Each structure stands twice: as structure tokens, then as C-alpha cells.
Image (cartoon, grey):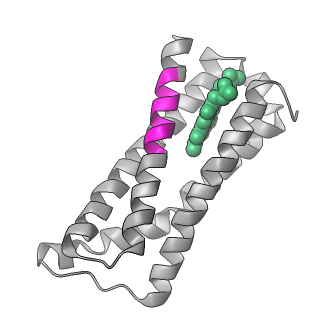
Amino acid sequence: MSTLFAFLHHLCAFTLVATVAIEFTLIRQELTVASARRLQVTDLGLGIVAGLLLVIGVLRVFFFEKGPDYYWHSHAFLAKFALFIIVGGLSVVPTMEFLSWRGAITAGQVPVMAAGKRRLVTVIIHAELAAIAVILLCAAIMARGGWV
Ligand code: HEM
């Protein structure tokens, strides 16, 4: 069971990176109806996989690895978990923006995005990628009993 959940955890983590990278590439290009739709679909995938990652991660903490006591006393785990939650909260901004495009996309029109909003969404997606790198570092440290 522990191996299965470790596999699922890695699968979700890699898929998450792929979805964020796709969003990062698309948001930097000129928006079209097709790319706007792709952003919406990718963002839905991102949300699902982030949710799965959280559920699988919590199950690993409580049932399949070193036990909750170990992780709640690990600064590396707490940093990883906090970063995940903070970035998850920030990701609501791009999600709300992509969802607001529904009308335009259905009408076959390119969604209009204010320059400031576009910058903000790009910065947040960039921050998501950077946070994943830090989360990976924290994961490696916590798994080896470091930074307690
Ligand atoms: C972007 C999100 C995440 C990424 C990229 C990620 C990545 C990883 C990686 C690469 C490992 C393997 C570390 C190693 O063995 O060297 C790992 C282990 C683990 N992760 Fe995550 N993780 C994420 C989110 C979470 C969350 C939200 C939780 C819990 C709520 C969690 C709990 C765990 C646990 C319990 C382990 C096992 C550590 C051990 O072997 O003692 N992860 N994670």
C-alpha cells in the first residue's frame, strides 16, 4: 500500500508540474479562443490533480509512512504543507479569471484580459512553478529526517 501511494503521489506531482507548465506557456502567448479554452481545461486538470495530491499526501502522513507525529514535528514538512496551501489559495485568482471567460468562449470570442490582470495571473503561475521547486526540496529533506 505504501508503494502504491508513493507512486500515486509522484504521478500527481509530475502531472501538476505539467499542468502549471502548460498554463505558463499559454498565458505568455497571444490569447486565442482555442488557447483560452485550453487554459480552462488545463486549469480544471490542475485543480483535480492538486486535490488528489492533497488527499494522497494526507493519507500518507496518517497511514502509510512514518506517522503523523513525525511529520508534525518536521519543519521541512510544515514548510512544504504551508507552501502548498498558500499557493493553492493564490491559484484561485487565475482560476476565477479563466472561469470568467465562459461567455466569451461560448460566443466564439477571444476573452479580453486587462494588462494588469494578465501580469498578475502570469506572476502567480510563475510563483506556482517556483513553489513546486521549493516543495520538492522540502520533500527530500523531510523524507530523510532533516530540518526537524
Ligand atoms: C506540489 C505538491 C507536492 C509535491 C511536488 C510533492 C513531492 C514529493 C516527493 C518528490 C516526495 C518524495 C520525497 C523523497 O522520498 O525523497 C514526497 C513525499 C511525501 N509527501 Fe509530498 N509532495 C507534494 C505535496 C504533498 C502534500 C500536500 C502532502 C501532505 C499533506 C505531502 C506528503 C508527503 C509525504 C507524507 C511524503 C513521504 C515522505 C517520507 O518518505 O517520509 N506531499 N512528496
Q: How many marks?
A: 0
Question: Could you tell me residue 110's position as x and y percent?
Answer: 22, 81
Question: Could you tell me residue 146's position as x and y percent?
Answer: 85, 30
Q: Quadrant of residue 89?
A: bottom right
Q: Nearer the viewer, residue 54 or 45?
A: 45
Q: Nearer the viewer, residue 41 or 136?
A: 136
Residue lying furthest right in this view?
148
Q: Quadrant of residue 142?
A: top right
Residue 148 appears in the figure? yes
Position above or below: 32 against 146: below
Residue lying furthest left in this view?
107
In the rendered image, the quadrant that contains the C terminus is top right
Q: Is residue 85 magenta?
A: no
Position above or below: 51 against 21: above
Q: Report the residue at 56% width, 25% height from top.
A: 59
Q: Report the residue at 61% width, 16% height from top.
A: 63
Position above or below: 40 against 61: below
Question: Could you tell me residue 19's position as x and y percent?
Answer: 41, 51
Q: Report the residue at 56% width, 13% height from top.
A: 2
Question: Could you tell me residue 111's position as x and y percent?
Answer: 26, 81
Q: Report the residue at 72% width, 32% height from top.
A: 140
Residue 81 appears in the figure? no
Main SS of the magenta part reads: helix
Instruction: Write down the region rendered in magenta.
Output: 7-16
| Residue 84 shown left or right of residue 23 in the figure | right
Which corner quadrant of the figure contains ligand 1? top right
